[in-house]
Image: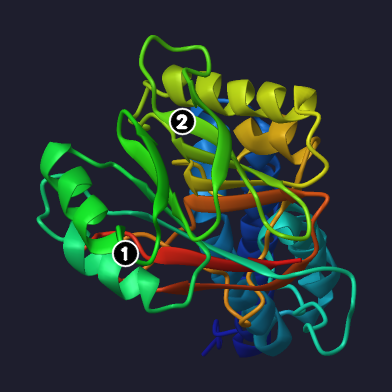
Amino acid sequence: MIDVEHRPPRARRGPTAAARWLAVGSVVMLLVVACGWIPGTVGTAVAAALPWLGLVLLSLLVAAVFLARRVIILILVPALLWIVAMAPALPALPGPTGSESASGAELTVVSQNVRARSGGATASATELAQSDADVIALVELDGDSLSAAQDALATEYPHSYTVGTVGVWSRYPLTNAEPLTLGLSWKRALRVEVQVPSAPVAVYVLHAASVRPGHQQDRDTMLSGIAEEIAADPAESVIAVGDFNAPSTDPSLAALRAEADGVRPTDGTLGFTWPVAFPLVRIDQVFVRGLDVVTSSTMRAGNSDHLATVTRVR
């Protein structure tokens, strides 16, 4: 009788097959992460998923440790590329506080998309004011929410300027206010100068056009437009806030990142702002030029579907 069973070779097929599949997964992840630098829909989609792709890479690495250690180095290639791609979104360390630095007065700027027709503008404005902000920027304002915000903030923030769906309220006087179209035919952005006692700060507030599959040209036009505005702005200190409708690593933000520093969260998180029930992506951004970031975080306010950004600069 002939024994046709060959147990040892069959046992060897397991690790070999696992190594093959892990290698394929690594190559696929390498290609996906690399696509995050492609402008347009592909780059935006990858940028939105990029933080979560890190969990996929971690799973591949853990599987390789237990099943096929020889492919660990192969998995490290897309992992390192992921770290490079995620650099604009990774947490940062807090800056020195006022007691540790004498480089200037601090200014706290908060910004939120209050969600039009939600009826929550009053609550958002009130709760944002309780954060002891110096400047409050609100976007996606409709007629009712604009009136509600004006009423809620009039006493503590007597200086304001609004245009279209965006508005800014300040404890300090505002000068040189102007609406911005940013290449489009409607006004969804503004620029003001906040007369902080130490030195004026140019504040930009943006509500970028929405992104839908195959329809993001308007948003890209606005992002390019605000980059051009900031590049030509003679102000020494600039901060731009609002709903950019773009993840932190979106290639459409490249021109803006060349002119100003993207503000990264300092609270140990990735600063996701949307949707509020379970934040998956950071589309509400902050950029600064000529300012030091002391702290950057997010907070819930009102019943908006966006978290607010809270940025303290000097």
Judged from the image, the secondary structure of the residue bearing numbered disc 1 is loop
Q: Position of residue 213 (x, y in %)?
A: 35, 28
For disc 1, the neighbor class at 10 Å (few under 14, some 14 to 19, many from 20) is: few
Please indicate whether residue 164 sits to the left or right of residue 282 in the image. left
Q: Amino acid at mark 1?
A: Thr
Label disc, if present, on residue 179 of the rendered structure = none
Q: Amino acid at mark 2?
A: Ala
Whether residue 173 is situated above or below residue 185 in the rendered picture: below
Label disc, if present, on residue 155 of the rendered structure = 1
**Is residue 166 visible to us here?**
yes
For disc 2, the neighbor class at 10 Å (few under 14, some 14 to 19, many from 20) is: many
Whether residue 164 is situated above or below residue 271 in the rendered picture: above
- Tell me the residue at 11%/44% (across/down): 144
Judged from the image, the secondary structure of the residue bearing numbered disc 2 is strand
Q: Nearer the viewer, residue 233 or 216?
A: 233
- Tell me the residue at 75%/64% (across/down): 79
Q: Position of residue 207 (x, y in %)?
A: 41, 37
Please indicate whether residue 63 sits to the left or right of residue 102 in the image. left
Q: Nearer the viewer, mark 2 or mark 1?
A: 1
Q: Position of residue 268 (x, y in %)?
A: 63, 82
Quadrant housing residue 278: bottom left
Quarter that holds the C terminus: bottom right
Q: Nearer the viewer, residue 260 or 187?
A: 187
Compute the Cα span from label 2 to label 1. 24 Å
Q: Nearer the viewer, residue 157 or 14?
A: 157
**Is residue 248 visible to us here?**
no
Could you tell which of marks 2 and 1 lies nearer the N-terminus? 1
Whether residue 225 is situated above or below residue 9 in the rendered picture: above
- Tell me the residue at 70%/21% (across/down): 228
- Tell me the residue at 63%/76% (across/down): 58
Label disc, if present, on residue 189 of the rendered structure = 2
Please indicate whether residue 124 sits to the left or right of residue 221 in the image. left
